[in-house]
Image (tube, rainbow, N blue to C red):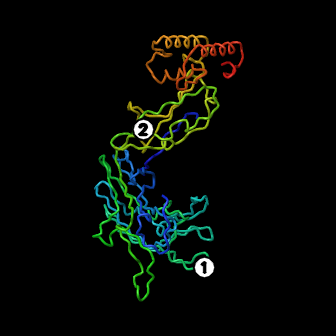
Amino acid sequence: MNSAFCKGMALLTGLSCLTSLPAHASYSSPEEVAVSLRAMDGGYIPEDNVHKIYISPEDARNGTSLHFGIFFETDPDIVDISYVSAVLESNSEFVNFTKDGFVNPSNYAYSTAQEFTHTDGITYSSKFCPYCFGRINMSGKYEPACSSFMTNIRENQFISTWAYDYGNTNEDGSTCFTAKFFGNASDSYSFLEFNMVLSPDTPAGIYPVNFVTSEAMNNGSTYITSDDSIPDEENPTYYKSIYSNFIPALYNAEIIVADTNPQTESDIAPVFRYAHDETPFSIQDFPEETNLLYGGDTLSVRTENLLEIFEAGSPADIDMNEPVRILRSGLALDGLSVRNSQGEEASLEYRIGLKGDADCNGVVNASDASLILKYAASQGSGRTASLTDGSDATAEQFAFFLADIDGEGKENSVLDASDAASVLKYAAAKGSGEDPVWNTVS
């Protein structure tokens, strides 16, 4: 099963507000109801609300199955929905619906009860997977609301109709003929799920999966109904059909097959830390979001969603068996490693070294003070100043961070004689057998 936004490798080794509807509404306001097609295993939802599911080149070569759900995205006070019909189409020979992938609360149950946690924190068990229409009864068990359904699945078209009705009574004894949103959360649970199959060797491109909205199809159009027409002699029609042209928003989906690995729009700067620092490593040390170029789009993805593990610990917990420790975590999207601007694997990176170790050799001594003085002299005379050979900009920035005792590499900080003097004091104390602390010698 393809999973958009598949999480990546371990980080460190060792480390819509809508107005309420009155009862028996006819769903005619653009602020009232939306029907949304989403990937159940992730996906990217841009501002236009066309839900995008990215497929890696490897999955495109091998073929893969995708799991979708259809959701109501509307005010939870809409509780009188009785009848739903949906028609979906894929206009590509490479993307097809599967007859055995249809999952509905009335025909799918686990062999044994499963434990679920409701959006309000309540934990309960059920053999039925929780769906949009349902409830938890007085016994603490989940009850699905679907009483009947019909489905017609072809290779490239999916036609289904559901009649929702509890067929029992409310907990106060009143008759309950209409479905309620489960947990008062209309857009947190699907009202059906289904699978689609991406054929092997699917070319790179965009493959839409759309709600059919042709009025010419009439009953084949996507629609919902309400029970505001109770049957009697003057009004024999029980259901009032509201077709797709009355539904304010139908959010479709696009399956996007990429031809290259995702790439960072700009490289993620490494984080520098001192070896004695006891501050824990944290994903918050890095940008909250990472912009990726993928499948012809620019995606803004939460950085933490590109990782699988962010292990606890701090630089002080690391064995400094090397002058400079570099800890990296690869990033992955759609199961593919993310690349940087140079085409290499992108990563989150910590560089850890000894404060004052300007030459990055693992020892803080007079040679570091001398190097700092030389740097300050070159800078003061207008010459190019460098602590390293200049071949690696990141290594130069890190050396400056270690050498800048009072400024700690912050913007506009400079190296000068006071930094060199602090290094000498620290080295002397260390040489005499003491265990100096930087804030007492700088």
> Residue 50's quadrant in the figure?
bottom left
Q: Nearer the viewer, residue 51 or 439?
A: 439
Amino acid at circle 2: Val
Give the x, y percent position of residue 316: 64, 29
Q: Nearer the viewer, mark 2 or mark 1?
A: 1
Establish if 430 lies above or below 123. Answer: above
Q: CA distance from mark 2 to mark 1?
A: 57 Å
- Say which residue label 2 marks: 338
Quarter of the picture holding the C terminus = top right
From this view, report whether residue 384 is shown above or below residue 159: above
Q: Which residue is mark 1?
A: 173
- Amino acid at the residue labelled 1: Gly
Q: For the residue labelled by badge 1, is the local secondary structure a helix, a strand or a loop?
A: loop
Which of 197/186 is in front? 186
Residue count near mark 2 (Cα–Cα under 10 Å), binned few <14, some 14–19, many ≥20: many
Q: Estimate the x, y position of residue 298 in percent, counting from the top left.
A: 38, 43
Seen at 41% across and 63% down, the residue is 35
Q: Which numbered disc flags the more N-terminal residue, 2 or 1?
A: 1
Quarter holding residue 346: top left
Indicate the position of residue 101 as horizontal and vertical percent values. 41, 61
Q: For mark 1, does the 10 Å Cα neighbourhood hold few (<14), some (14 to 19), or many (20 or more) residues?
A: few
